[in-house]
Amino acid sequence: MRRPRTGVRTRVRAAASARVAGAIPAIQLATLGALTMLGPFGTDASLPALPTIADEFGSPAGQVQLTLTGFVTGMAAGQLLAGPLSDMAGRRRPLLWGTAGVAVAGGLAALAPSLVVLIAASACMGLGTAFALVVSRAVVADLASGPALTRSYALLGTVTGIGPVLGPVGGAALLVAFGWRGVFAGLATAAIVGVLLAARLLPESLPPERRVARAPVRLPGLVRRTFRSRSFVTGAVIVWLTFAALFAYISASPFLLQSLLGLSPGWYAAVFAANGCGLIVTGLTAARLSSRLSRRTLLAIGLGMQVTGALACLSLVLLDAVTLWTLLPPLFLIASSIGFIFGPAHAHALHDLRDMAGTALATIGAVQFLGAGLVAPLVQIRGEGDPLPFALAVTCCSLAALVTLVARSDAR
């Protein structure tokens, strides 16, 4: 008797229905990680090209960095739409349409005739990646529970951390081969691949009976509910502050390392990739330790790393001792610390809000990327040759996050 053929999608659905103890099938988690990677890949791939874009359009560094501000502002606004919409209509369709929008906006950015158009296209790209980011994380909240949720978020953050590794390297390669326009064409291609993977491998994770009716209309009330949760406030504030510190590093690093310290785009990409590898290692370590250590302990490790790196940067600037070799180790600590922070912080924020995970994650993400958009131009407020605003930003943000952890007794 001939055995009936079983397609990939059927096997994925069977794996999802047979999951044990809140675990997520590896193929789904990898696909979700690839989709969330579009956001950091989108910001990081263009970093080596920022000085080139500034030269072509004859614009100062602060104006060119508005492409990053537009991108992350689009991500902030998009998440406020994506989260409630996915709570109401399910996860699959918003995920597919949002990722397809990234591809369209990437093509527009590649053809941009002016900096204004490029900034607008970057904002649209950020809007689309917001759907990929917040809906992918909501899918994890749908499928995982208990320690598996912390572990899944740590692993998801690890896969997402590949973005900072591949982004600058791929961006530098595309910049050399095709110019800065090729960087945005490459981003559009990556989004097309993401749409195909999601359509093939990700079934709907939110059944109709668990959906929130009229969630976009009820958004203000739902957001107020999130802020009444102590665990949400603690986890969210830690995410917001540590990401602001990370984005200060992301936005300042091309000018610090290339313009101030003389690295070529290729060597800059290599340094940025090495820091991304550090994030991957810490993320895998956090995932491995999540069943043995509390969320508070993991957060303490990560915040200790970030505060140490930030204080080292500030000391180097105040002592006028900034060189390539003195600056690289603290930058590594700032970047790699995120692997210990984001998984436990997101899991803690969702502890009481699993029934509205999309809206809760959208609230976290909107403030997170809005803050990042404000930080990006501030780190260059005194010119690309002055590292003091960057050092002050990362120090203030990381110290405030550590104080939040110490002060809030609910972070267990």
Image (cartoon, grey):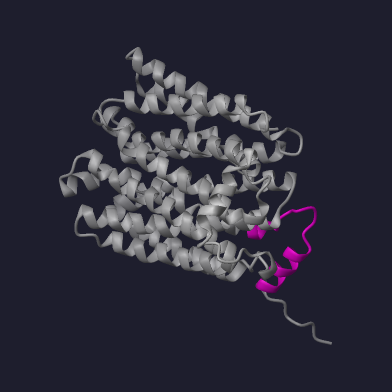
Task: Judge whether residue 15 is colored magenta.
Answer: yes
Magenta: predominant secondary structure element? helix
Res 31 quadrant in image: bottom right
Residues in magenta, as a range: 9-29
Who is closer to the viewer here, 347 or 305?
Answer: 347
Residue 3: % across, % down: 79, 82
Q: Is residue 169 left or right of residue 92?
A: left
Residue at the location (27% across, 25% down)? Answer: 386
Residue at the location (55% across, 32% down)? Answer: 337
Who is closer to the viewer here, 100 or 56?
Answer: 100
Who is closer to the viewer here, 136 or 78?
Answer: 78
Residue 75: % across, % down: 42, 52
Q: Quadrant of the C terminus?
A: top right
Residue furthest right as drawn: 1
Task: Judge whether residue 126 is colored magenta.
Answer: no
Q: Is residue 260 above or below residue 100?
A: above
Q: Is residue 2 left or right of residue 161?
A: right
Residue 373: % across, % down: 37, 43
Q: Is residue 49 above or below residue 182?
A: above
Residue at the location (41% across, 40% down)? Answer: 371
